[in-house]
Image (spheres, grey):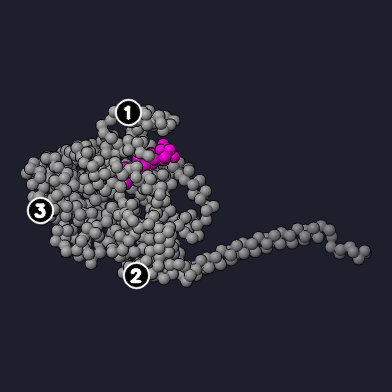
């Protein structure tokens, strides 16, 4: 036998060689997986050590898990469904007035520091990326991240929501309140129970549609006050909290770990988001349809179906005959550049005005009405004062006279304090400004938060904070108005603050001058107090609504 010849048959050698290569490939793949896992684990360990010991915010306290990972925030907001706002109160009691609520952001519970963050002159304040996009990447002023672009968009809207503009439209507002009172009158005569959540949501939605678009949505006249629409909006808010809380660092431009190449993923997803939402959540289909209807109703069907050439839109719309000026008049006559006049941008601006402007005021009215009706002494003092400017139960009051009534002001201020419409933490980011808190440096670009709910329930400022006491606003030696921040402050404060105040004055006066509510079936801890934070506060899941019996005042 030739020495170079193998003693093994060729077929055996080929089988052995194939088997050996297969094992080698599997080993290589296994080694690659192990290597990737080891690299990933090493990065996680490095990231945790960096966040705990070398991060620019390392001097600020907080739970170890919150300082090391976003999982702490996600757990309370996503797993426990909107509980982080309430957990923050406990954390501040343990760690002090400033904490790291996640690795890269700070939360403050110092009422005197509020004006340092939320004021007109404090640098170029921006809205953090994941907060600006909480309702999706839609180009409305409320969701604008950058300071300069926000200033341009907000500037075009400011004149329409001025005090003068509100006063001009008071008669239209009163017409919708008269309709609500007519529904209450019928309910009192036929012993029909009324859910305050939906009746106030209906009237504020009608007012907002009238005010902004000169359209009459007639929601107050629907037998159920348009209940399904508001349940859809509740679902929308739940999804919005999910978006805000789950903003992963890799997709968060404010995070030092933000990767620009991931931007396309976010925008590709959101480009088909509307279609996905219609499939995953049927309630969102109605919300998206509402968004289109606002533009169609506000501009008219002819313009809505057009190719949207802005010069033609201006020509047609500004010569239309409608009841009164609308927000679209101000936008079309403004100096906004052409790219700010697109169909989708005006549509989303309209949608944000209606959803943000109606739901928050309705929330305050619902809870405030309960507190007034549940406190006979407060109700009688309020009624006595209202009679001085409203001699008859059906009188239409003068808004400026209502604004001068001290007890009515105290009642509304206490209602705003106790029923803070936005329970979620408000966020700001200063790209160029260094903040200082108690001698500690906060680097530029740090996202900082404060929560109005914690300020409004601060026992040092508002003793017995859980009790409804309007007199505190009349007797206090402290400047309490400084600590009342339901509409925020600064260049990003609530756009519709003047309209909201007008609604509160007029609705409270016109309703409680004429009606009383039997709230015996309402349980405050279950139906009124905020138990979860979904941007706005919502009661416990077993709540049966704020269902009341309507009673009519005799004189």
Secondary structure type for disc 3: helix
The answer to whether 190 appears left or right of 25 in the picture is left
**Magenta stretch encompasses residue 443:** no
* Quadrant position of the C terminus in the picture: top left
**Mark with earlier residue (1, 2):** 1
Highlighted range, magenta? 336-357
- Residue on which disc 3 sits: 381
- Residue on which disc 2 sits: 438
* Closer to us: 176 or 115: 115
The answer to whether 441 appears left or right of 512 in the picture is right
- Residue on which disc 1 sits: 319
List the single residue furthest toward the right: 1
| Any part of residue 466 in sight | yes
Q: CA distance from mark 1 to mark 3?
A: 49 Å
Measuring 24% from the left and 44% from the top, which residue is drawn there? 163
* Closer to us: 245 or 61: 61
- Judge depth for marks 2 and 3 and give the one in front: 2
Q: Please tell me whether residue 511 is drawn above or below residue 221 in the rendered image.
A: below
| Any part of residue 549 in sight | no
Rate crowding at label 1 as few (under 14), some (14 to 19) or many (20 or more) other CA atoms within 10 Å: few
Measuring 15% from the left and 51% from the top, which residue is drawn there? 408
Q: CA distance from mark 2 to mark 3?
A: 44 Å
**Mark with earlier residue (1, 3):** 1
Rate crowding at label 2 as few (under 14), some (14 to 19) or many (20 or more) other CA atoms within 10 Å: few
């Amino acid at each position: 036998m030739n020495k170079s010849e193998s003693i093994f048959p060729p077929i055996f050698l080929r089988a052995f060689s194939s088997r050996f290569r297969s094992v080698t490939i599997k080993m290589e793949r296994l080694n690659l997986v192990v290597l990737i896992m080891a690299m990933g684990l090493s990065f996680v360990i490095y990231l945790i050590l960096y966040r705990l010991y070398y991060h620019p915010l390392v001097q600020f306290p907080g739970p170890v898990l919150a300082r090391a990972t976003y999982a702490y925030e996600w757990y309370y907001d996503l797993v426990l469904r909107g509980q982080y706002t309430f957990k923050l109160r406990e954390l501040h009691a343990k760690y002090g007035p400033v904490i790291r609520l996640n690795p890269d952001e700070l939360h403050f519970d110092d009422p005197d520091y509020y004006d340092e963050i939320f004021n007109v002159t404090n640098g170029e304040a921006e809205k953090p990326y994941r907060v600006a996009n909480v309702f999706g990447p839609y180009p409305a002023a409320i969701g604008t991240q950058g300071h300069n672009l926000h200033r341009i968009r907000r500037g075009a809207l400011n004149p329409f929501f001025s005090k003068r503009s509100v006063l001009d439209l008071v008669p239209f507002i009163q017409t919708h309140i008269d309709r609500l009172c007519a529904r209450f009158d019928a309910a009192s005569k036929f012993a029909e129970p009324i859910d305050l959540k939906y009746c106030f949501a209906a009237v504020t939605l009608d007012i907002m549609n009238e005010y902004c678009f000169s359209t009459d949505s007639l929601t107050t006249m629907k037998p159920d006050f348009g209940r399904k629409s508001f349940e859809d909006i509740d679902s929308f808010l739940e999804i919005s909290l999910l978006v805000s809380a789950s903003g992963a660092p890799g997709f968060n431009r404010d995070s030092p770990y933000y990767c620009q190449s991931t931007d396309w993923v976010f925008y590709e997803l959101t480009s088909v988001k509307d279609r996905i939402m219609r499939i995953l959540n049927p309630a969102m289909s109605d919300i998206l349809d509402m968004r289109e209807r606002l533009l169609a109703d506000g501009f008219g069907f002819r313009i809505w179906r057009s190719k949207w050439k802005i010069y033609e839109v201006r020509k047609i719309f500004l010569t239309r005959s409608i009841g009164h000026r609308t927000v679209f008049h101000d936008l079309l006559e403004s100096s906004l550049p052409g790219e700010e006049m697109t169909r989708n941008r005006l549509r989303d601006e309209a949608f944000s005005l209606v959803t943000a402007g109606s739901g928050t005021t309705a929330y305050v009215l619902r809870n405030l009405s309960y507190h007034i009706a549940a406190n006979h002494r407060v109700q009688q003092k309020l009624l006595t004062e209202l009679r001085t400017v409203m001699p008859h139960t059906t009188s239409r009051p003068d808004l400026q006279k209502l604004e001068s009534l001290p007890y009515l002001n105290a009642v509304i201020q206490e209602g705003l304090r106790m029923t803070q419409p936005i329970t979620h933490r408000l966020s700001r980011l200063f790209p160029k400004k260094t903040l200082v808190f108690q001698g500690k440096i906060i680097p530029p670009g740090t996202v900082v938060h404060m929560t109005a709910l914690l300020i409004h329930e601060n026992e040092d400022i508002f003793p017995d904070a859980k009790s409804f006491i309007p007199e505190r606003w009349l007797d206090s030696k402290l400047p309490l108005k400084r600590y009342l921040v339901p509409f925020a402050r600064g260049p990003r404060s609530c756009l519709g603050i003047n309209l909201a105040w007008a609604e509160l004055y007029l609705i409270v006066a016109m309703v409680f001058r004429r009606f009383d509510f039997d709230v015996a079936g309402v349980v405050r801890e279950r139906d009124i107090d905020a138990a979860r934070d979904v941007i706005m506060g919502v009661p416990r899941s077993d709540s049966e609504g704020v269902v009341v019996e309507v009673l009519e005042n005799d004189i």
